Image (cartoon, grey):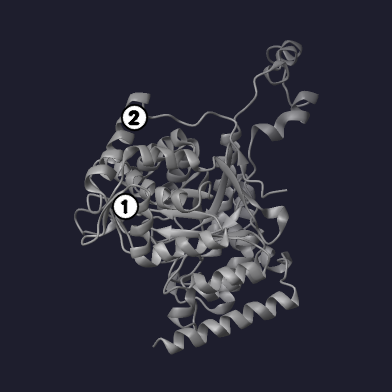
């Protein structure tokens, strides 16, 4: 039985008309045919040239015939399963399910001062343990933190993958640096699981050699792939949302062609990570409503294509701490992504852009994700839910519905009960010491750490993971 996620009981939002969808698609095809995309690996140029693309060997620009793009789109699976270490937690992407994962940060947060600090190994273990326990998280993303104290930067990704294997049995996405996938793939195979290889674009319109090498190795292993773009409106993309989406589409489509030419029917999803540019500072803005609208348009395009898509930006915010700004930046972004048809959303954990993350924030986000799932389920309209006979029997005042069997049967289906929201009466709140949502989240996090026991690796798998880490350490030492 796969990880649950939330089943969408309502039709996704459609902001674009059919004509506008076709306009964006046609523009993406034009970008691919006339401007092209840089591929920084000779072997990829060979593959694409053999498939009928026009390749400029000097500039490494590949131009794509529209009919090839359309043919490769048709080869992509509409829904697929990615294995987890625990078969009960296999990840299903596509169809009418909405899945949640987490973001990441360079540092954790000291909850006594709310100042950032480097995470320790124990911080890392606790964070992964909480992510493993939270019910709305269906899978783990590349990392919660970019390494921890005492880890060589070259080993950051490998240590992260090993930590996630040891303290979670959920499916995980992985990133890469300096060929790290040549070690993470055997690590996953050792643990009897799959990992999804995240392939990061270089905007605008380039695929770097290390990204292409990940593609080749993941295809050889038979593991699924996920492309991620990372466009910034007004900087690496046009300042207009339709232009940015058309450009991002073209970038993803170029990789879909390569993957489907190499391995027809290979499992692949596409991830949109949009941000806008602060024109006063030149820095990207996270949590902006413009990025949320970009996700809406992007999601409609990829639902039109029928290929699983995700949004990476909803969980990243400009707020520097766990405050009201963080709440509204996250909530607006995630709700718009979910309503517009994203198959997976990176949401939990992150606080200040990509700088900080904390499991307490993930606990707060778990409530928001649950509320989003409640909305997505929609409601049934039938004789039972219309309650006409009950209304007739109760009648006007002084009648009421509190003692109705209908109320007893249905009240839980009409409201969501968050675990960290304060819903005390005011006198009760004063009596209990004025607890905040953050207080409840801290207590819930501690309860998880006290009670949740992740599925451990069998001793033989643990030994092999450790051996792979030692092999990787020797490999990177030899390259310095």
Residue drawn at 37 percent across, 41 percent down: 68
Q: Is mark 2 on a helix, strand or loop?
A: helix
383 vs 101: above or below: above
Spot occupied by residue 47 in the image (x, y as percentages of width and height): 38, 56
Q: Is mark 1 on a helix, strand or loop?
A: loop
For the view shown, which residue lies furthest in the left direction? 280
For the view shown, which residue lies furthest in the front direction? 50
The numbered mark at residue 305 is none
Of 301 and 383, the residue lying toward us? 301
The residue at which mark 1 appears reads as 231
Residue drawn at 59 percent across, 46 percent down: 80
Of 376 and 227, the residue lying toward us? 227
Of 295 and 429, the residue lying toward us? 295
- Quick one: label 1, few (<14), some, or many (20+) residues within 10 Å? many
Residue 104 shows in this picture: no
For the view shown, which residue lies furthest in the right direction? 405
| Image quarter of residue 46 | bottom left
Residue drawn at 59 percent across, 56 percent down: 139
379 vs 399: above or below: below
437 vs 144: above or below: above
Which mark is in front, 1 or 2?
2
Label 1 close to label 2 by CB (< 8 Å):
no
Quadrant of the snapshot with the C terminus: bottom left
Of 397 and 42, the residue lying toward us? 42
In the drawing, does residue 296 fall left or right of residue 465?
Answer: left
The residue at which mark 2 appears reads as 22
15 vs 272: above or below: above
């Amino acid at each position: 039985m796969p990880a649950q996620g939330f089943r969408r009981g309502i039709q996704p939002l459609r902001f674009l008309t059919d004509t506008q969808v076709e306009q964006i698609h046609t523009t993406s095809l034009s970008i691919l045919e006339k401007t092209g995309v840089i591929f920084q690996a000779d072997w990829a140029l060979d593959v694409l040239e053999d498939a009928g693309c026009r390749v400029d060997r000097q500039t490494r620009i590949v131009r794509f015939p529209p009919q090839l793009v359309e043919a490769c789109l048709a080869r992509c699976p509409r829904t697929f399963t990615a294995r987890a270490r625990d078969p009960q937690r296999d990840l299903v992407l596509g169809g009418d399910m909405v899945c949640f994962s987490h973001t990441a940060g360079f540092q954790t947060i000291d909850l006594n001062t709310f100042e950032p600090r480097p995470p320790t190994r124990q911080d890392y273990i606790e964070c992964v343990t909480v992510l493993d326990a939270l019910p709305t998280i269906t899978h783990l993303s590349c990392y919660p933190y970019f390494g921890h104290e005492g880890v060589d930067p070259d080993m950051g990704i490998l240590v992260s993958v090993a930590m996630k294997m040891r303290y979670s049995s959920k499916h995980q996405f992985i990133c890469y640096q300096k060929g790290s996938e040549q070690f993470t793939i055997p690590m996953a195979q050792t643990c009897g699981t799959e990992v999804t290889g995240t392939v990061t674009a270089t905007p605008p319109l380039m695929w770097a050699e290390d990204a292409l090498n990940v593609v080749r190795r993941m295809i050889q292993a038979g593991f699924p792939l996920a492309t991620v773009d990372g466009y910034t409106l007004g900087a690496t993309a046009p300042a207009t949302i339709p232009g940015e989406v058309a450009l991002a589409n073209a970038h993803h489509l170029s990789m879909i062609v390569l993957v489907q030419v190499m391995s027809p029917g290979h499992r692949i999803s596409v991830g949109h990570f949009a941000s806008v540019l602060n024109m006063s500072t030149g820095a990207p803005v996270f949590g902006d409503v413009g990025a949320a609208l970009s996700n809406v348009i992007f999601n409609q395009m990829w639902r039109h294509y029928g290929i699983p898509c995700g949004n990476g930006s909803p969980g990243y915010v400009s707020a520097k701490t766990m405050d009201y700004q963080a709440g509204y930046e996250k909530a607006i972004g995630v709700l718009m992504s979910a309503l517009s048809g994203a198959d997976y959303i990176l949401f939990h954990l992150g606080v200040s852009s990509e700088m900080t993350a904390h499991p307490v924030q993930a606990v707060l986000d778990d409530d928001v994700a649950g509320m989003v799932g409640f909305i997505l389920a929609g409601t049934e309209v039938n004789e039972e839910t219309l309650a006409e006979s009950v209304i007739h029997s109760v009648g006007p005042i002084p009648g009421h519905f509190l003692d109705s069997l209908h109320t007893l049967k249905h009240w839980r289906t009409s409201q969501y009960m968050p675990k960290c929201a304060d819903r005390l009466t005011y006198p009760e709140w004063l009596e209990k010491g004025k607890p905040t949502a953050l207080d409840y989240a801290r207590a819930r996090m501690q309860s998880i750490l006290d009670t949740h026991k992740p599925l451990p690796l069998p001793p033989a798998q643990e030994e092999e993971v450790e051996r792979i880490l030692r092999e990787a350490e020797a490999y990177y030492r030899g390259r310095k």
